[in-house]
Amino acid sequence: MANQQRNNNNSKSLRQLQVAENIKRTLSEIFLEKGLLNYSSSYISVTQVDISPDLKNAKIYLDIFNQNQEIKTKVLNYFNNLEKTLRFELSKKIKLRYAPEISFIEDKTQENAFRIEKIIADEKKNYDQQNPQKNN
């Protein structure tokens, strides 16, 4: 039975996946209720939650829409300082034996995707300049 509850992609149990998705949704609602989606000229989005097998620790990945790395660091520090408050709010809305310890981490997926797209576009531009006859 335990093998049937495992996700082949990342070895997370079905329960872990369900709890993580519930935390993600609930934290997004809390951010909306508390006006935390915009902080320090940045738009904040919860992109992913990674929860430990014992459901006691959760890493919350935030996409912080701001180009300034200092501001991103400030935003992460702010949310990590709110950990106890957010954990309490989470425990009121999600019924678990233990409210998980939470830590906030910057999600760099979108940033990396933009960087890769730029590299590909630059390479294509270089190729097109070196091989003008093949462009037609």
Image (cartoon, rainbow, N blue to C red):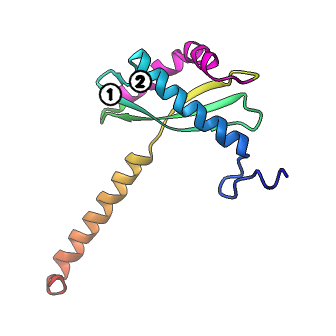
Q: Is residue 107 left or right of residue 98?
A: left
The answer to whether marks 1 and 2 mark residues whose Cβ atoms lie closer than 8 Å is: yes
Q: Is residue 28 left or right of residue 18?
A: left
Whether residue 15 is visible: yes
- Which residue corresponds to the image point at 14% horizontal and 87% vertical from the top-left? 133
Structural crowding at the residue carrying mark 1, measured as other residues with C-alpha within 10 Å and reported as few (<14), some (14–19) or many (≥20): some
Callout 2 amino acid: Val
Separation of marks 1 and 2 at Cα, in angstroms: 8 Å
The kind of secondary structure the magenta stretch mainly shows is helix
**In the image, residue 114 above or below residue 51:** below
Q: Examine the image and state in which quarter residue 131 appears.
A: bottom left
Mark carried by residue 42: 1
Q: Quadrant of the C terminus?
A: bottom left
Residue of label 2: 75
Q: Examine the image and state in which quarter residue 21 appears.
A: top right
On the image, the x and y values in percent for residue 67 come to 30, 36
Region in magenta: 71-96
Structural crowding at the residue carrying mark 2, measured as other residues with C-alpha within 10 Å and reported as few (<14), some (14–19) or many (≥20): many
How many numbered discs sit on the rendered protein?
2
